[in-house]
Amino acid sequence: MNLQISSAFLMTSYFTTVTTATVTGYLYVIGSGFVGEYLFKPFVEDTSVSRSAITLMEFFPPFSLYRIIYELSPPPATGFYSDFSGVQLGDLSNPENGILVLLIIMVLEWATFLFLTLYWDEFGCLQNVMRSRQALQKPSTQPQKCEASIEIDRTDIMREREIVDRFLQQPDNSYSIIIDNIRKVYPPKDGNAEKVAVKGFSLAIQRGKCFGLLGSNGAGKTSLISMLTGFTKPTSGTAYIDGLDIRRDMSEIYTRIGVCPQFNLLWETLTGREHLMFYGRLKRLNGAALIEAAEQSLKVLRIFEGGVADTFVSQYSGGMKRRLSVAISLIGDPKVVYLDEPSSGLDPASRNALWNAIKFAKKDRAIVLTTHSMEEAEALCDRIGISAYGRLRCTGTSKELKAKYGGTFVFTVTAAAGEDEAVEQLVRSISPTAKRTYHIAGTQKFEMPKHGVKISEVFRAMEQAKGSLNIVAWGLVDTTLEDVFIKVAKESEKCPD
Ligand SMILES: Nc1ncnc2c1ncn2[C@@H]1O[C@H](COP(=O)(O)OP(=O)(O)OP(=O)(O)O)[C@@H](O)[C@H]1O
């Protein structure tokens, strides 16, 4: 059985998708049973077939398993209720049953398969190193023609690249995550063309900081996190986590990271506490420290009251499962934590508890958080990056991004029917370059450049206008992160590559 397991390990090196591996595994197990019964058994029972030929066949693991089961079973002629007493130690020297040779073959193959598995894993990494070196030689970070024409300022992206280059020349342990021109291409599948999900991403994240990765659906956020956490391999480029290279040192990296995936990966038949104890042990916690860490996580993420910590996960609500996933990612003091849309499906109270836990967890570790909630990004992240079409488009603090991409106020006015033109003239008198972005049933929205507009003047003009116009409501708001996000996404649409 150990030989079958080690050969299964070896076979995993050749598969990249779970579905193919599962189907092949089933076919292999069922097929090898049939082949053993109908092909190998007649040879074993036919005394005219040379024993050396049989031994040779036994190098095929299913045949050796079949042979040993065959030898350990009572002879069919005598049946189960005979006086057959099984194979004794003394029988090992009997050349007729060939068990001794069989055991030697199995032990040798077991060790060889395990060694080969390790070798292929390493060799695979070496191939990646070679591939990424080739990729590095290409000037992929040069701004492209198209990018020069769009309104997105690339200086922050260039600055990230400079930090990464500096790190590569002289590693600096103040950065927990360095992503070096990483790229992910999914091969063609089901008649669809290949998909470039991540197009040369470079980023540097300091210890103690939370980086928020925003992006529309399909922007490549999950693909990026999958590469950083070892779920998939980069097509080219690499990343350094706590100074360790994801191409070579993934097993060491696993002990230093925590991951909350986009979809909960939990066992329905384990309790919340058992999950935390299990993952805590993987992070090398044990004894009192493990029990304490699990208890603490359960309390902080509110999976504790009413004995819920010791209830099977199958009885948890969606929000509780999500909080447990976050608790798992934080147990064992990981130096880098990835949170992929951690608050999806949480009610406001649970979300607040989660945010507090993340704010607390930020100290002394780097967090990468992907989210579709601008509010969450503003509440938790020290820096924010917006990605679109697999490329990082801009980075900065929420304030910097708003200042850079949202130099406008949004002015909304609702007036009585027939007064739209007069309202528009009024707005133009406050800000001649105001741009109307929305107009429906008496409600108009204008973007006003911030320079040249004084908020006090807007108030005064609107108060005066109330005498001559029937203004129902009006409002002036500063640019939000959402406005920035929409603007960057729109600009990126013009130049997806
Ligand atoms: N295994 C895969 N095979 C082929 N294409 C894939 C695979 N996984 C993702 N993609 C494609 O890669 C692109 C990026 O997907 P990804 O899931 O990384 O985006 P995302 O930013 O996480 O999106 P969301 O916000 O919806 O989770 C998408 O166009 C997606 O269809």
Image (tube, grey):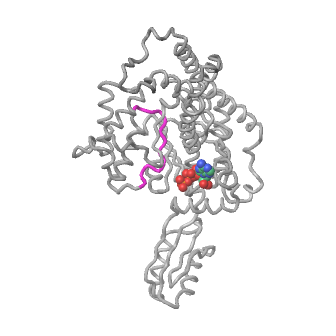
Q: Magenta region's main secondary structure?
A: loop
Towards the viewer: 211 or 130? 130
* Up/down of 91 relative to 250, above or below: above
Image quarter (top left, top right, bottom left or bottom right) of the C terminus:
bottom right
**Can you give x and y, in whole percent of width and height, for residue 393 in the image?**
63, 52
Asked which quadrant contains residue 11, the reply is: top right
**Can you give x and y, in whole percent of width and height, for residue 235 in the image?**
67, 40
* Up/down of 62 relative to 378, above or below: above
**Can you give x and y, in whole percent of width and height, for residue 345 in the image?**
40, 56
* Up/down of 486 relative to 359, above or below: below
Towards the viewer: 46 or 497? 46
Q: Is residue 63 magenta?
A: no
Outermost residue toward the left?
306
| 349 relative position to 391: left or right | left
| 359 relative position to 253: left or right | left
Outermost residue toward the front?
77
Q: Which residue appears at 43% of the width and 16% of the height? A: 87
Residue 187 visible, this orientation: yes
Q: How many marks?
A: 0
Towards the viewer: 243 or 412? 243
Q: Is residue 340 magenta?
A: yes
Towards the viewer: 69 or 337? 69
Which residues are the magenta region? 332-344
Q: Which residue appears at 72% of the width and 44% of the height? A: 141
**Can you give x and y, in whole percent of width and height, for residue 414 in the image?**
47, 81
Residue 243 visible, this orientation: no
